[in-house]
Amino acid sequence: MATVVLSPRDLAGCEHRVALDFGHERRRSAEPDPPGVQRRKEAAAEHRAMVRELLRGIHSDQPGAFVTVDADIPALERVDATLAACDAGAQWIWNATLPTDVDHARRGHAELLVRVGEGYVPIIVVNHRVSQRVKGAPLADGRPASMLTSPLWGWAPTPDPYRTPRPNRRDNLRLAHLSAMLLEIGRAASSEPSELRGGVIGVDADCIVVQDTGAMFEDYLEVLDRRRAIASQRIPTEPRRVSECKSCQWWVKCGPELEARRDVSLVASGNQASALTEAGITTVDQLAAQRGDPPENWPGNVRFTDVVIGAIAWLDDLDLVRRLDTPRVHRADVEIDVDMESYGEHGAYLWGTLRTDTTNPDEPAVYRPFVTWDPLPTRDEARSFAEFWTWLTAEREAAHAAGKTFAAYCYSQQAENRWLLGSADRFAGEPGIPSRAEVEAFIASDEWVDIYEAVGENFVCPRGKGLKRVAPVAGFSWRDDDASGEASMEWYRAAVALGGGRPDLSQRERLLEYNEDDVRATKVLREWISERAAEEIPHERDVLARH
């Protein structure tokens, strides 16, 4: 076997993936990425390019301070260029590639190296949030801030009372990996591992979040040693279904293996599967036969009976199992279904609505979208959101004035709430934009109903609670066979010409159709829960009695 050299990606996630990556003839790197993975990579590349230009602009008045290593030259030349920039004392080195450390099985690159004293601190740029604003007033009661940040113009770690961290183990391991590589070649800002630091620039790109890499150095070294042994095939691994399976190209190999041995991870995930395996429950059949108390170390946020029912449902090919004798969901005279479409972290470009007056069965349900086709991020997002909020508020007030009950519905309110509140914050003061307090009051009211939560209250969902999993059980189907959140990202790129060229108007129509189907699916599902689910879905007591 060739010498094992690990990148930061090999340190986190599925251990069996690492074993397959290094031990199988068909190396994963030779296979094309699934579309969703490719889109995320492209979005991350765009974000890194934006941050590069932002930093280049900030330091443009300091000739020679900001050095960019050409990403298109061979790896060894990038290493030479990085070391030459270090020798020249460059303050900021973009796209830094470090020498491969064969002895310790390490390779890696940092988006940025920042000179601190006689050495360098690694900075990585990621396309997710690494901090969040403190709600309310900043800490002012003598308590220490929970994190350090540094401005983009220089390395100046300072306690930050305005933010709280959003820890990410993958980021922390990568920074420890890079710090160890810098330490090995004598380029680190400190020769003491316990004093090592790193930084992360997240999707907001408004500061550098400072990480104490020294504090996790022992943990990192343990992870490195174990992953190195796995990659060298010295520690055996076996497949288990985990969250990353959905985007892993090894699933074509692992999936059939798990099915063949009826592995319990097919119906129980994460800590559930670990607790079951520790208790000797390794197959779906064994789990289906369980009754009574859960095994030791069972996660307290999951009802054990639900997982047993999930195993039975897997054996009997059931999509849903009813919890209640009579399913219930909040209904109203005027019902408005809402579905939001966003593009990554850049904003919400579409608020789709479907209005139904249940007191007048002859009145058709009307779909109405509020949309901007200016590429995100754009100030025109404020206009479309304001129009949506103004219309929704008017419908609510009109229903109340007519003596009718009102409810607005979404599917999994976490996404909608995030952009409702975020839009109120970002566009505060612009025409038609509600205050944060108005949005919070609406979200907290009984008139904002999450059908996702209603599904969970009424049913055990062995195949998942996603709308596209559950709505077909109620008889709904999407017009587009490729409809999905991942696919909509590609459609949006074409619709607004993010990749260049001319906007594809057909993809705009496709997005509107997809959004309309989503709100209609929520309506169909809600009505089905009220009217037919009790007759069509077996109750859990009957399912448990089968095995």
Image (cartoon, rainbow, N blue to C red):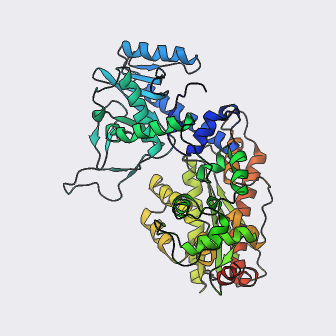
Up-down: is 381 above or below 435?
above
Image label count: 0
Q: Quadrant of residue 384?
A: bottom right
Q: In the image, what residue occupies the spot 68% across and 72% down?
A: 312
Residue 132 is situated, as x and y percent measured from the top left of the image, at: 40, 51
Q: Position of residue 58 (x, y in %)?
A: 40, 28
Judge whether 376 appears above or below 262 on screen.
above
Q: Residue furthest left?
A: 142
Q: Quadrant of residue 336?
A: bottom right
101 relative position to 3: left or right: left
- Where the C terminus falls, by quadrant? bottom right
Q: Who's the residue at 71% across and 84% down the image?
A: 534
Measuring from the top left, give residue 321's x and y in whole percent: 68, 76
Where is residue 243 drawn, in percent x and y? 59, 53
Residues 503 and 237: in front is 237
Instruction: Tell me: 355 left or right of 72.
Output: right
- Say whether residue 181 is left or right of residue 544: left
Q: Nearer the viewer, residue 434 or 205?
A: 205
| Residue 110 seen by the camera | yes
Which residue occupies 44% across, 39% down?
173
Residue 462 visible to the viewer: no
Image quadrant holding the N terminus, namely top right
